[in-house]
Amino acid sequence: MKICRITDEYRPMLGAVGYLYYFENAGRFYIEIPDRLSFNDAPLILDQYIKKGINYVDSEWSMHWVCNRIIPRDRQNIGQILRDAGLAEYDEYKLLILTDGRCAQDDCMIEQITENELPDAIRERGKQRIQSVTPLNDRRLLVFFHDKTSVMCKLTDLVGRDRRFKPVLSDNHVFEKVRVNAGGYSIGWGETIEIADYVIRKIGTPLPMNLDDMRLFIDREVCDTAETARRLNCTRQNIDDLVRRGRLTPVKSGARSKFFFRNEVEERLW
């Protein structure tokens, strides 16, 4: 992850007007907006998020902010420009750094910083981001956050009639491919279909559990093939036979082992 401080070149008294995060492996940008920044002092794009009471700019509009400050990918002589800049390929972040993030539309500029140079309030926001998402039956989602909270929500409640989500709602295989996007700012399906963390918090039903509880449950209530064979005093072949006959149901099957709920295994001893 790369981080840049965004400042107003001609109004240094404002301090940072934003912090640009770049997750290089995912190719995603996000801009964090300081709580103290007012609507009147904020540069374009950021001001509209302040107006909505949102403290960061999503990946799509953060990328717009970046692309407004660099040479377009479709520039006619882009190959020669990249060679002159010492770049082997088009890279939004490296091009942004070359110009210090300046553009004609505003007076903003950027400087690279380390995570340790971020204000505590900005670092603390990481604890509000999404940690994990699990797709469930009936298009439900179980979402865990870094602050040890969790919610359950229905996808239909989150997206309403947004037509972008039609493939996700109509195809269970697509729905099950949901992932947490870089930085935990959202969950999504592919590059363009995503749901922000604050939307999930607002609409989801809070649950009295966290991811540590889930880890503890799995550790105590799930056993692999080897442990199951020891408990039942049988061979792996016997376990496979019980599975084929529907007497044991794996919760997960791997190449070399299957995993079972401990209570179902112990029922075989009754």
Image (spheres, helix red, strand yellow):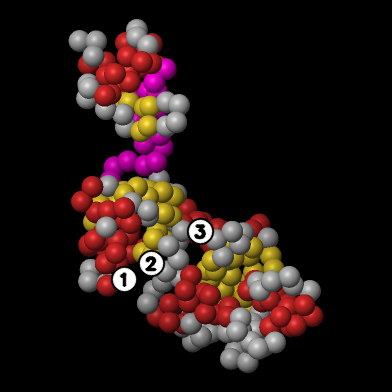
Residue type, mark 2 in image = Ile
* Label 2 vs 1, first from the N-terminus: 1
Q: Position of residue 125 (x, y in %)?
A: 49, 59
Give the crowd class for mark 1: few <14, some 14-19, many >=20 residues within 10 Å. Answer: few
224 relative to 104, above or below: above
The local secondary structure at tag 3 comes to: helix
Which stretch is magenta?
Answer: 207-226
The local secondary structure at tag 2 comes to: strand
Q: Nearer the viewer, residue 89 or 231?
A: 89
Are the two marked residues, 2 and 1, in contact with CB atoms closer than 8 angstroms? yes
Residue type, mark 1 in image = Arg
Q: Which residue is mark 3?
A: 182
Tell which tag, 1 or 3, sits nearer the viewer: 1
Alpha carbon distance from label 1 to label 3: 20 Å
Alpha carbon distance from label 2 to label 1: 7 Å
Q: Which residue is mark 2?
A: 193
* Label 1 vs 3, first from the N-terminus: 1
Q: Nearer the viewer, residue 66 or 84?
A: 84
